[in-house]
Image: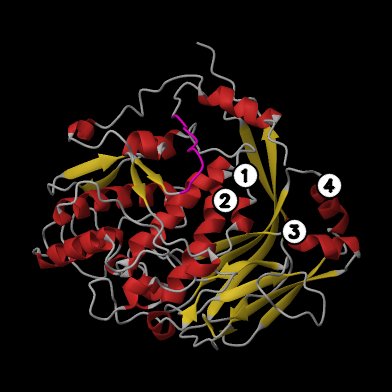
Amino acid sequence: MDHKPTRRQILFAIGATASVSLLDSPLSLFKHAEAAQPLVRRDIGGMNASDPILVSYRKAIATMKALPANDPRSWAYQAAIHGSFVTPVQTAWNTCEHNSYFFWSWHRMYLYWFERIVRRFAKDPCWALPYWNWTAVNERQLPAPFRDPASELYVANRNAAMNAGTGSLSAGRVDYSPAFSLTNFVSASGALEGTPHGAVHVDIGGWMGKVPTAAQDPIFYLHHCNIDRLWNLWLAQGGGRSNPVGDATWGTRTFTFFNEAGTVVQMTSCEVLRAAQQLRYVYEGEPPQVNQHCRPRIVVPPFTFTKERFMIPPIPPITLNSDQTSISIDLREVGPRLRTFMSGTTDKILLELEDVEAERAPEAVWDVYVGLPENVTLTSESPHFVGSVALFGSGIRSETRHKFLPARFIFPLNRALVPSLERNAEQLSVIFVPQGVLVEGKPLPPDVKSPVRIGRVGLVVEREQESGGRKLKE
Ligand code: C2O
């Protein structure tokens, strides 16, 4: 590959250094004696149970579990900040952001304050969370130290095969390349929230499978560290990828957490843009972090995105259950337009599933294949695999707290569409295959607890335009 910066990267770099913001000045809390060097969040792969990182984590978990439940630093309270079935609801409970463009930043803040609390109770001032890099082929099993029933890291209610070490995540569950192909922050974060994020939650199962209980499982924080690391990696790809730093709501909405003294703290997305500088951590093995700044004076971000739902096929609601389900989208009319979109390099075609819901948590995942020619074996290594439907965070009626919100999924289609367009196919197949975790290389048959209903299917084109990142005239 050629390493000359592209015009877009140059534009972006110019934008990024244009002004220093008042919004993202360092947190005053840093007057704590923290190491000047960023701490390193290490890969759990290859760490054994006696690694000081895991010893400290276990020690802190035991201490946090022994605190009274109304102490905001207790294990139960921290988990309830993410979600809880318990009432009455206390300060900051149930505040996780899902199906929202705060998904990445809220979870970053959450991990950050949690990590400080663990550090304090482990009495280990250099402690940093490890991350579970499930995409690596040798890390598809639940990390071994979390499978020892005698350990604080163990949770009995997880998927039995995952807990036994016989189960592993399939390649499709952990494939973030479709999400990474998207350049628009909202779409990339939304696609990634589905696959791998939600799919891995559901595959681990038990507490991890449901938002109101997920953060009670110690593996939650390692899973989310990896999601957080992927935020850095997504930005590092360049090509116009940027946080919505020009969006005032995104940058300035405050969220509530607790510090290691048990005191309420507030944080905004603008305060967590640059992990190494603002939060003093980096990930082991990551490329240099892209340092973004909230720039109140920039009104035009370097790129703007427009979305057009150019086709809503007349398909009745789809029900996903333990059988494979397929639908067919008529391409005869939209074929020519699709071809025009595909001939550009920046237009992204998305399959959108809307009004997705289930009565209870289905505890199952459906892999989605698009444009698969007949008689081809389904494998998630195929270019026709576009992601998974795994309900987590919204769309589950029995988990509704305030107002019911159906789920929405988007799948980038550019790669999967090519063969169908090349052969002028009249129909485009979309196949939903329920698949459990892999045992001895084969997916376990799904045990669907509740069918999933998809209300509407649409084809969307997302177009990217250079806007130059101009600053507002002063
Ligand atoms: Cu807020 Cu992975 O969950």
- Residue 80 visible to the viewer: no
Q: Which residue is mark 2?
A: 188
Which residues are drawn in magenta?
285-293
Quarter assignment of residue 463: top right
Does the beta carbon at disc 1 come under 8 Å from ligand 1? no
How far, Cα to Cα, is label 3 from label 1?
A: 15 Å
x and y percent of residue 342 in the render?
A: 80, 50
Q: Are marks 3 and 2 in contact (CB under 8 Å)?
A: no
How far, Cα to Cα, is label 4 from label 3?
A: 12 Å
Q: SS at mark 4?
A: helix
- Mark 2 surroundings: few (<14), some (14-19) or many (≥20) residues within 10 A: many
Q: Are marks 1 and 2 in contact (CB under 8 Å)?
A: yes
Q: State the residue at coordinates (8%, 64%).
A: 68
Q: Earlier in the sequence, mark 3 or mark 2?
A: 2
The residue lying toward the viewer, choosing from 218 and 51, is: 51
Quarter holding the N terminus is: top right
How far, Cα to Cα, is label 4 from label 1?
A: 17 Å
How far, Cα to Cα, is label 1 from label 2?
A: 7 Å
Q: Are marks 3 and 1 in contact (CB under 8 Å)?
A: no
Looking at the rendered structure, the kind of residue marked 4 is: Ser
Magenta segment's dominant SS is loop
Q: Report the side of 148 relative to 160 (left or right).
A: left
x and y percent of residue 254 in the render?
A: 31, 41
- Mark 1 surroundings: few (<14), some (14-19) or many (≥20) residues within 10 A: many
Q: Is residue 445 magenta?
A: no
Q: Earlier in the sequence, mark 4 or mark 1?
A: 1
Looking at the rendered structure, the kind of residue marked 1 is: Thr
Looking at the rendered structure, the kind of residue marked 3 is: Arg
Q: SS at mark 1?
A: loop
Q: Earlier in the sequence, mark 4 or mark 3?
A: 4
Q: SS at mark 2?
A: helix
Q: Which residue is mark 3?
A: 415
